[in-house]
Image: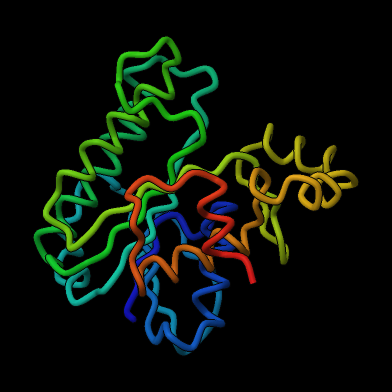
Amino acid sequence: MKIIIFGATGMVGQGVLRECLIDDSVNSILTVGRTATGIADPKLQEIPHADLLNYGSVEDQLAGFDACFFCLGVSSAGLKEADYARLTYDVALAAAEVLSRLNPEMVFTYVSGAGTDGSEHGRVMWARVKGRTENALMKLPFKSAYMFRPGVIRPMHGAVSKTRSYRLFYTAMAPVLPMLQWAFPGSILTTEIVGRAMIRVARRGSSRQILEASDIYEIGRG
C-alpha cells in the first residue's frame, strides 16, 4: 500500500508512522504537515506544508495513494467554537476534498475521539465540531471512510504529545497506565494498537464506518 499520513509529528501520528514503517504491506509513505519528522527511511517521503487549508502548490504529489491516515488535531481548551472548527473541520475537509478528487479508490481514516456527537447538536462544543467533521468526511466520494474514536491512548516507543497538558497527563499517569490498560484493554489503547488497526482497516475494510475504542482494540491487537 501507498499511504499518506497527516500529522505524523503528533503523538498518534508518530505511533501510526512507526507501524507503517515496520509493516511489510506498506511500501511507500508520504507525510504532510507543518513540520517534517526528520526520520530517514527508504519508504518515507515528507512534504512540509504550512498552509493546511490550501494544497494547490503540492497537489501533484498527492495522487496515486491507497490510504490516508489523518491524525492532525488540536485541543479545544481555550478556543471559541469558530476557531476550533477552523482548525478541525476546515483543516480536515480541505485535505480530504483534494484527496477524494485525486484518489477515488482511497481509504480515508480520520482520528476523531470518544464522545464525538454525530447529531452535531449536543452541548459539548468539541464533540459537535468533531461530529460535523465526521459526517462531512463520510459523504465524500472515497472508496471508504472510517472514523476512529479512541479515548485514552498510551504513547509507546517514544511517541510524545505536542500538547503540554497532555504531556503532563501522560507523565503523571505513566506508572498506572499499563495496569489500567491490562484491566480495561478495550478502553485504553496504545499508539501501537491504533497504528496497526488503521493499517488493517485500510487493507481489509471494516463492517463499521465509526469505530469506538473497543472496535479499534479488537482490530489492532496481536
Q: How many marks?
A: 0
Residue 122 vs 192, above or below: the answer is above
Residue 192 vs 190, above or below: the answer is below
Residue 211 x/y as whole percent: 43, 48
- Screen quadrant of the N terminus: bottom left
Residue 218 x/y as whole percent: 56, 59
Residue 25 vs 8, above or below: the answer is below
Q: Is residue 162 left or right of residue 115?
A: right
Q: Quadrant of residue 192?
A: bottom right
- Screen quadrant of the C terminus: bottom right
Residue in view at x 36 percent, y 72 percent: 204
Residue 58 x/y as whole percent: 20, 64
Q: Is residue 106 left or right of residue 191?
A: left
Q: Is residue 135 left or right of residue 18?
A: left
The colour scheme of the drawn protein is rainbow
Residue 29 versus residue 211: which sits nearer the camera? 211
Q: Quadrant of residue 82?
A: top left
Q: Residue furthest top?
A: 123
Residue in view at x 49 percent, y 37 percent: 113
Residue 96 x/y as whole percent: 22, 51
Q: Quadrant of residue 85?
A: top left
Residue 74 versus residue 1: which sits nearer the camera? 1
Residue in view at x 32 percent, y 79 percent: 2
Residue in view at x 12 percent, y 65 percent: 104
Q: Residue furthest right?
A: 175
Q: Is residue 100 left or right of residue 116?
A: left
